[in-house]
Amino acid sequence: AKATGKNAVRFFDPDMEQQISQRLRLESELRRALARDEFELYYQPQFHASGALFGYEALIRWQHPVRGYLGPSEFIEVAEENNLIVKMGEWALRRACEQASKWMRTYPREVIRVSVNISPRQFHSPNFVQSVAMALNNSGLSPWLLKLELTENLMLDHIEQIIQKMARLSDLGVILSLDDFGTGFSSLYHLKTLPITEIKIDRSFVRDLNSDPSDLEIVRSIIDLSHNLHKSVIAEGVETREQYQLLQAMGCDAYQGYYLGRPACADSLKIDRVQDISS
Ligand code: C2E
Ligand code: CA
Ligand code: CA
Ligand code: CA
């Protein structure tokens, strides 16, 4: 266009410049937040098909001094771009183990697992297995009560290294779950080979279960495939009774979603319900 003279050539357009400075600000705020202990874990219940409580997924929240309560979508991506996610993830792991250890001691006759999200960068960090071992040791939590949710994107490369690391985690006794299944690129070979006990069906397949026949078939296939490989299946994002019933009919093993329970802070969980449901 005529208006594009040489003065109009810019290396940064103002929008981009603003985005970059916003990111930098968020980054330094995140650093401070870690130092000041502004993060908190919420817990969302997971249930067996029988209706018994299975455990809780730990979900991070940020109590921002100015902007109020923030969910992970507001900051995880920026944290992922640098090593902040490793520190943040280690904090979450420690805190979740402490919490689950408290449940273990308070309700010795119940099995209440805690499920922790592990970002690919955290998984790949050199001290990851050691940090899991330390979180278990320091909290006194039994390893089989800890579940790690790993995403498929993890599997993109260095598969030998990944297999080795998973084997070491598995040797520790912790449970491995493959999160957001169906949205990434894991091959059937990985499913067969890796020491993963649980497949987590992504919310995007559950959402339109009662209106989209192909989603129904995809979910059915995931459940059958997982069972054939001796893995259990949990569905996330179950919001309605219809979704729950369709999943039950297809033999899904476990459930999580607003229909069954929303994420809440540890103090407000009604653990006493465990006894009623499981007996
Ligand atoms: P995710 O692992 O797929 O976790 C499930 C997300 O779905 C959570 O969002 C949860 O609150 C939400 N959810 C649960 N049930 C329902 C439902 O019935 N309907 C709908 N629409 N949503 C539901 P949240 O807490 O905002 O977390 C978003 C993502 O942030 C998580 O997705 C996870 O990938 C990541 N994340 C959360 N905490 C951590 C953490 O401590 N470390 C790492 N690395 N990632 C985390
Ligand atoms: Ca998850
Ligand atoms: Ca998901
Ligand atoms: Ca996820």
Image (tube, rainbow, N blue to C red):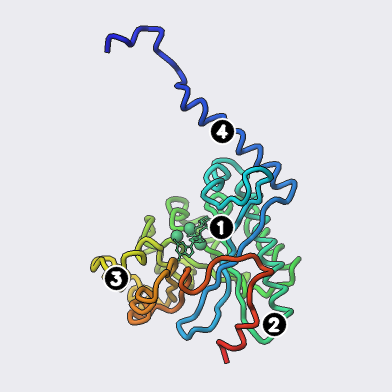
**Residue at 36% over, 79% down:** 245
Secondary structure at badge 1 equals strand
Q: In which quarter of the image is residue 236?
A: bottom left
Q: Nearer the viewer, mark 2 or mark 3?
A: 3
The answer to whether mark 2 is within 8 Å of ligand 1 is: no
> Between disc 3 and disc 1, whose residue precedes?
1
The reply to whether callout 3 and callout 1 are in contact (CB within 8 Å) is no
Secondary structure at badge 4 equals helix
Q: What residue type is labelled 1?
A: Ile
Q: Which amino acid does label 3 sit on?
A: Asn
**Residue at 54% over, 46% down:** 74
Residue toward you, 81 or 7? 7
Disc 1 target residue: 118
> Between disc 2 and disc 3, whose residue precedes?
2
Q: How far apart are marks 3 and 1 (CA)?
A: 31 Å
Q: Which of the labelled discs sits on residue 22, or is there none?
A: 4
> Between disc 1 and disc 2, whose residue precedes?
2
Residue toward you, 74 or 28? 74
Q: Distance between the residues labelled 2 and 3?
A: 38 Å
Callout 1 crowding tier (Cα within 10 Å): few <14, some 14–19, many ≥20: many
Q: How far apart are marks 4 and 1 (CA)?
A: 25 Å
Disc 3 target residue: 210
The reply to whether callout 4 and callout 3 are in contact (CB within 8 Å) is no
Callout 4 crowding tier (Cα within 10 Å): few <14, some 14–19, many ≥20: few
Q: Quadrant of residue 244?
A: bottom left
Horizontal and vertical percent position of residue 41 = 64, 60
Disc 2 target residue: 107
